[in-house]
Image (cartoon, rainbow, N blue to C red):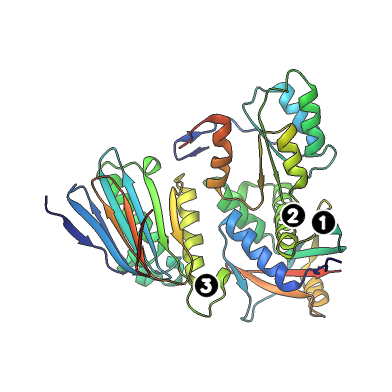
Amino acid sequence: MTQVIEPTISAAVIALAKSLDLMAFISAIPEEMPYEIPAEAVHVSIAFRRDTAGTLHIIAPVDLPRAVLGNVLAGGDPAACSPAKLDDAMKEIANIACGQMLRSIGGKYLLDLPTCSHVYADFAWKTFLEDDQTAVVNAEGIQVLVRVTL
Amino acid sequence: MDIAGVKAKEMYEAGDGEQALKVLHEHPVDLVLADLHMPVVSGTELVRRMKADPDLNPIPVLVVSADPDTEHLENLQAHSVNGYLRKPFTPEELLKALQPIFGELA
Amino acid sequence: MNTNTITVNVSDAQISRDINAVLITHALGSCIGVCLYDAALKMAGLLHYQLPTSELNPQKASEQPHMFADTGLQTMLQNMESLGGVGKRMTVKLAGGAEILNDAKLFSIGRRNYTAIRKLLWQRGMLIHKEDVGGADPRTISMKVEDGSVLVKSCGNTYSL
């Protein structure tokens, strides 16, 4: 019987870092320094199923999708991007990171469409960091929470 | 958009497959770059409807996807689309995927 | 025909239109060597930078712009363009960005150097034609001004890029 490898938080961190690097030219590393929790953030989640079912969550201030669009648009003005476009960029980050994470562990998976909401970061941060299913990543000065639940 | 001398004259965006079909009926295009996962009408369904429409059938299609599984992408390439790209991809990989469609680029 | 060897040091860049010249830079570890070639003018530029962004040390960047990917590329490109070069028609080749021992691959300075130059080139509408980046070994690269051909030497092996 083929062993199913379950996605782990470290696989999620590497997947997010690789996705931001390749598609948005953003270097991301595990956060090791003290930082201030942002006032508001965007929470995007994407569910996956088949070999294992679970959800990848990413929480970040809107600075992250703005930085992504700023790099990708190559000359376009990220400040001119609508809230809908910024939400779209966050969903796409999660979509690519989730696919990359599942590809790295192997197996058969289907991805659902990502969902996005705006949250008070303080509460989200405290809740997510209560257990070891969450990691904090520094994406060129922007703190990003990555969480995998199975 | 102008990358290494390769110019895209006009680019139209659509948030889902249904919007994409509307755009395609309103504007002539040389290429469709479609995500497989879209709300309302998926990329797979968009391709099926394009191939069934004599006006849209000839338009080359490149599908993109973050899906970990390539089986569906390979099936699409074998039967209906001109190629696929797995996300994440680099600009160079995109141009390379376009070369069989448009000839040598950049 | 005498070959004129022009050495590019660390945190340095050189430009040449001398068809007898070869630009060469050594010891590319986590640093990146950027080779730009404008075939229409037979003009070659080689940059050897150490760090991804001048934001790390703006004071240093004003004194040594070639130490950083952003100020280094900007300076070298400006100089090439002032001589008639056109960025978007240049052939771009990269080498270097090796991972320092014990440094996690994706998070190493070498990788960050590579990501930085990819962004800067994309923003200028310049594509990377060939690259030899990553790994654990240092590289030496040389570029002939006559035709823009690049040779990479690493661990006793020599190969074209």
Q: Amino acid at mark 3?
A: Ser
Kindly identify which chain the residue marked by label 1 belongs to: A
Q: Residue at x 73, y 31 (%)?
A: B80
Residue wearing tag 3: C108
Distance from disc 1 to disc 2, alpha carbons, whole Å, reads 7 Å
Q: Is there any visible trace of residue A38 in the rendered image?
A: no
Chain bearing mark 2: B
Q: Are marks 1 and 2 in contact (CB under 8 Å)?
A: yes
From the viewer's perspective, is residue C150 above or below residue B25?
A: below
Q: Residue at x 51, y 66 (%)?
A: C111
Q: Which residue is mark 2?
A: B68
Q: Residue furthest top?
A: B54
Most extreme residue toward the left, as rendered?
A: C1
SS class of the residue under badge 1?
strand
Q: Nearer the viewer, residue B32 or A137?
A: B32
Marks 3 & 2, CB-CB < 8 Å contact: no
Closer to the observer: label 3 or label 2?
A: 2
The residue carrying mark 1 is A109
| Front position in the image: C99 or A5 | A5
